[in-house]
Image (cartoon, rainbow, N blue to C red):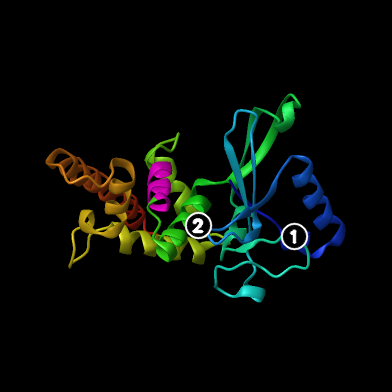
Amino acid sequence: MDIVIDLQILADTEAYHTLEDNLKKMGFERAENDAGKKLSWRWQTRTEHGALMVLELLADAPDIAGGKVQPLPTEGTISALNIPHSSIVFDLHQVTEIQAELLGGNGIATENIRHASLVSFTCLKSFAFDQRFERKDAHDLVYCIDHAPEGMDAVVESFRKERSGKHGAVVEASLTILRSRFAGDEKTEGYRKDGPISVAKFELGEGDEPEQREARALRQRQVSDLIEQLLARLAREGTA
């Protein structure tokens, strides 16, 4: 689970220690990377059923880390990974009521959770895919657009609204990535680009059997068509 935190939490001594104490009380500990080094921005624990729960603390710190994805320096055991533009979620978010069982057998609680809106989520996933080429990032952004509860009309309207708002430059940069990675142009058909191929391979695997190759090719076209539809409708409405 990715959690974007305000930089003030890392700078405020009392808030910093409160965050650290709360994580430890819930049984979280610092996770390790492949080299066995403990990470200050990734914490993990296991549920009573043995499932691994991983929290990654993210922040938007252009003055400290510029445009680089890197851990932010702190004096304690908690830090955050700098993710450019991640602070967009403080403005572009939704609130959903969820009911879940607390860790440690502490009962079931109902809470209102703030989470990224479709637009901010798509923006951050497009930036992530563009920078690290993880197939899951491509799948995640396509899945959320394709399964938006209100349908494509609402998706287009959301992008249209935010593109002319406070974070318009960030939204525009995200759409440029979608156009480059997923949509056809004068040189290349969209389904042949790395975005649709990443989605298809993530969802359907990399097997070389004819049926699997055919299924991936179909999925690639579906993905490219979806993104091209979004971009075309934004263009028709005079926002591209």
Residue ID at (41%, 49%)? 136
Q: Which residue is mark 1?
A: 77
The quarter of the picture where residue 98 lies is: top right
Q: Amino acid at mark 2?
A: Leu
Residue 104, position as x, y percentages in the image? 73, 31
Residue ID at (71%, 30%)? 102
Q: Which residues are magenta?
A: 136-145
Residue in front for this viewpoint, 136 or 190: 136
Residue 96, position as x, y percentages in the image? 62, 35
Q: Which residue is mark 2?
A: 124
Q: Is residue 179 left or right of residue 215?
A: right
Q: Residues within 10 Å of mark 2 (few under 14, many from 20)?
A: many
Q: Amino acid at mark 1?
A: Thr
Tell me the quadrant of the picture where the N terminus can be found. Answer: top right
Q: Residue furthest front?
A: 36
Q: Residues within 10 Å of mark 1 (few under 14, many from 20)?
A: few
Residue 236, position as x, y percentages in the image? 31, 55
Q: Residue furthest right?
A: 14
Mark before the other along the chain sequence, 2 or 1: 1
Q: Residue furthest top?
A: 107
Residue in front for this viewpoint, 234 or 135: 135
Majority SS type along the magenta span: helix
